[in-house]
Image (cartoon, helix red, strand yellow):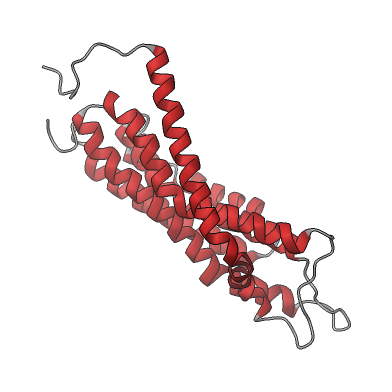
């Protein structure tokens, strides 16, 4: 007997599309509501995000706006990205509620903790970038500037730089989830992934080289956590590998 919860006949395509539209509208509405709440504090949010660099600027140095509209659009863009960032659990919940009816019970028991873990890991990666990586790389950049050069970073360029790193570290911290899903889905095994460890390590450093500034410190700060997270994913995936139902019927 199937362990799928629903035994109803398949719904018409139009019904599925209507439901998908409703889920998307709810997700967009959540982002919009969070953005409306955040926008009055847009400048404060930018001040917080730029603190790791401003704290290291030499006396008399400031951040600047080189474009006419940058003082408005840069905090605006940051508020919008922050709204998506904060609303992501609800957005993912809407995605989950759309696909969950078609899943089996044992799949749901696996998917729920993986979904929650993926959100937490992305937040952890972003926090790691802000509190650990940013102070180190900005300290390096400001210390190697020529003596007669005044550091005056453009606010929009800074925002694009830190958003790239937030995304890179948030994505890198998803490696355990990817490894576990690959093992659980039967695409590979924990043993096979372990044998590819040398290639994974090289790939981590290549990924770090492409997504971080051209210095060994920031590259290592991304590559080493990626490797350790890969090991965690392989270990956890190995624990669940032997069970087909991962928790029983």
Q: In this view, does 54 lie above or below 229?
A: below
Q: Which residue lies furthest to the right in this view?
A: 148
Quarter occupied by the N terminus = top left
Q: Give the residue displayed 38% in from the left and 45% down from the top.
A: 177
Front-lying residue, 88 or 72: 72
Front-lying residue, 196 or 17: 17
Q: Can residue 213 be seen in this view?
A: no
Percent from the top left, x then y, of residue 193?
39, 41
Left or right position of 65 against 79: right
Percent from the top left, x then y, of residue 154?
78, 66
Q: Give the residue displayed 34% in from the left and 44% down from the top.
A: 115
Quarter occupied by the C terminus = top left
Left or right position of 59 against 30: right
Q: Can residue 242 be seen in this view?
A: yes
Percent from the top left, x then y, of residue 248?
12, 34
Left or right position of 95 against 205: left
Q: Give the residue displayed 33% in from the left and 34% down from the top.
A: 97
Percent from the top left, x then y, of residue 7?
18, 16
Q: In this view, does 131 lie above or below 99?
A: below
Q: Residue furthest bottom?
A: 59
Q: Give the residue displayed 42% in from the left and 22% down from the top.
A: 18
């Amino acid at each position: 007997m199937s362990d799928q919860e629903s035994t109803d006949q398949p719904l018409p395509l139009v019904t599925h599309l209507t439901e998908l539209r409703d889920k998307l509208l709810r997700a967009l509405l959540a982002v919009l509501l969070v953005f409306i709440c955040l926008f009055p504090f847009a400048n404060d949010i930018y001040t917080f995000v730029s603190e790791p660099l401003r704290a290291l600027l030499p006396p008399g140095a400031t951040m600047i706006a080189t474009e006419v509209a940058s003082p408005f659009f840069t905090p605006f863009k940051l508020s919008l990205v922050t709204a998506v960032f904060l609303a992501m659990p609800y957005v993912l919940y809407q995605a989950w509620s759309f696909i969950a009816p078609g899943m089996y019970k044992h799949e749901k028991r696996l998917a729920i903790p993986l979904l929650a873990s993926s959100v937490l890991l992305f937040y952890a990666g972003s926090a790691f970038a802000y509190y650990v990586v940013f102070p180190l790389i900005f300290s390096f950049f400001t210390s190697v500037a020529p003596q007669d050069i005044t550091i005056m970073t453009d606010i929009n360029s800074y925002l694009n730089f830190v958003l790239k790193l937030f995304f890179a570290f948030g994505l890198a911290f998803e490696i355990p989830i990817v490894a576990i899903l690959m093992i659980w889905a039967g695409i590979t095994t924990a043993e096979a992934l372990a044998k590819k460890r040398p290639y994974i390590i090289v790939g981590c450093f290549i990924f770090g080289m492409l997504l971080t500034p051209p210095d060994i410190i920031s590259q290592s700060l991304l590559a080493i956590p990626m490797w350790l997270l890969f090991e965690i994913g392989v270990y956890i995936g190995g624990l669940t590998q032997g069970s087909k139902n991962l928790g029983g019927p």
